[in-house]
Image: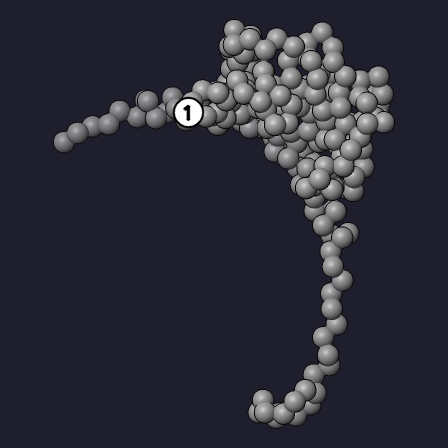
Amino acid sequence: MSFVRPWPLIVLLLLAATSAHAQAPSTLAGITLGDAASQYKGRLGLSQARTVGDAPWLRRIPVRADAHFDKGYVLVGTCAAPGRVARIKMRYRDDSLDFFRKISGEMLSRYGDPTEYKGEIDGRLMGNKWGFSDPWLRPVSLILQRAEGEDPEIGRGNTVKLTNWGLLEAERACWQERHAPAASKKPAARSGSDNGYLPR
């Protein structure tokens, strides 16, 4: 009779739960999720805001470069809470693999093991995703990635993305409710039965 020791399973479960219990990050590049974009006038190019093509409930605003980041953007709502920051994505100035390994190690120390690997088998895209909940139990994700090729959103190099999915979903639901097609009126049913053979 074989006996399976439970310790490896217990250790894996504890590691998987680490990021869920770690405090959810809320600020990246000096910008905090949930804040109004207007309070970051010196940081954001507010006059360059553009509607996101396939998500009209969001607007994309560029973030100005600083000592750590080359460029980036935030996504803000247009419906439930217009102008409120729901996502921050930034590209680091240092695009080296050594820097990626350094910040990966720091995030592992701070947030524990990632909940998902975000990469490709060929190694041209590598990264990790951590999942959290904010104080209102809305899901928050943190993704650190390195792209050897071109990232279609922000270019090659080392990027970090912080998203409050609860805020994004609230914007989508609000916009879809406000732009739902008007319900068509059905013709009033006539009394009596015609067994389905008379025109209506």
Q: Is residue 10 left or right of residue 84?
A: left
Q: Quadrant of residue 16?
A: top left
Q: The residue under label 1 is which amino acid type?
A: Ile
Q: Disc count in the image?
A: 1
Q: In the image shown, does 93 or 141 lie closer to the viewer? A: 93
Image spot of residue 117 (x, y percent)? 47, 25
- Crowding around mark 1 (Cα neighbors within 10 Å: few <14, some 14 to 19, many 20+) is few
Q: In the image shown, does 14 or 43 lie closer to the viewer? A: 43
Q: Is residue 167 left or right of residue 94?
A: right
| SS for dot 1 | loop
184 versus 5 height, above or below = below
Image spot of residue 4 (x, y percent)? 24, 27
Q: Is residue 171 visible?
A: no
Q: Quadrant of residue 120?
A: top left
Image spot of residue 91 (x, y percent)? 65, 17
39 versus 56 height, above or below = above
Name the residue located 77 percent from the left edge and 17 percent from the top edge. 64
Q: Quadrant of residue 83?
A: top right
Name the residue located 61 percent from the left edge and 27 percent from the top edge. 152
Image spot of residue 92 (x, y percent)? 64, 13
Residue linked to disc 1: 121
Q: Is residue 61 left or right of residue 13?
A: right
Q: In the image shown, does 150 or 135 lie closer to the viewer? A: 150
